[in-house]
Amino acid sequence: MQKFTVHKGLVAPLDRENVDTDAIIPKQFLKSIRKTGFGPNLFDEWRYLDQPGKPGVPESERKPNPDFVLNQPRYKGASILLTRQNFGCGSSREHAPWALDQYGFRAIIAPSYADIFFNNSFKNGLLPIIQPEAVVDQLFNEVYAFPGYELTIDLERQVIVRPQGEELPFDIVPFRKYCLLNGLDDIGLTLRHADKIRAFEAARLTAKPWLAHTMGVDKAPV
């Protein structure tokens, strides 16, 4: 998982409430068992006019919706998503943060999130930041008023830095902060103890050698 320390990026405004996970990545794209390739179909039903979208169709063959925010030239390359309350509601598909991350977003700013989406985001290197609705309103106004509007997110200091230098603090659970700063997902956290795991398995097979046959191996892990 990619580390998140300090990120400066262009902000894209998605001015919608209750954006559910089926809007983030529609159900027909969930057939893949891989964790890659979902970025082109992020917000598929809003980004494209040729609907319903089908898996495997190259992006070059799709018909973009010129009215959708991510298709507007001024927001090309955006890596921070600004949106409204209850973002990520609906079904608990982990594909939603995968699609956002693979499109290029590193962080989201909203007044509130659905719980499961909120948790899944941290586990996949995506930082969901909660800000009061009044602050979110101000940010929307600034994004609309100033093309090329960028924010800097300093995770270590837990602040969003606006272009004029004003800092907006945000809260984050210390454990989640540690994982993002160090680029550790659940597997990465486990692999920190790889030496102890190998030692345990070797000792167990020494004491109970018949387990090697039931496990389908001939010797202890190296």
Image (tube, rainbow, N blue to C red):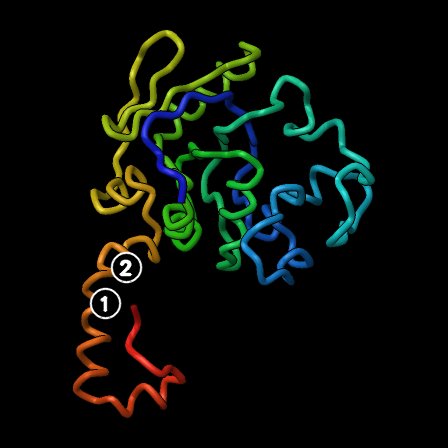
Quadrant location of the N terminus? top left
| Between discs 2 and 1, the one toward the N terminus | 2
Residue with the mark numbered 1: 197
Q: Residue 186, image x and y in percent?
A: 33, 56
* Residue closest to the far top: 164
For residue 159, side relative to residue 31 (left or right): left
- Please tell me whether residue 74 is drawn above or below residue 179 in the rendered image: above
Residue drawn at the location 71% of the way across and 44% of the way down: 45
Residue drawn at the location 19% of the way across and 69% of the way down: 199
For residue 181, side relative to residue 61 (left or right): left
Callout 2 environment at 10 Å: few (<14), some (14 to 19), or many (20+)?
few
Q: Residue 135, image x and y in percent?
A: 38, 23
Q: Secondary structure at mark 1?
A: helix
Query: Dividing the picture into quarters, in which one does residue 178 lie?
Result: top left
Q: Looking at numbered disc 1 in the image, what kind of residue is underneath it?
A: Ile
Query: Dividing the picture into quarters, in which one does residue 221 lie?
Result: bottom left
Residue with the mark numbered 2: 190
Residue drawn at the location 29% of the way across and 17% of the way down: 167
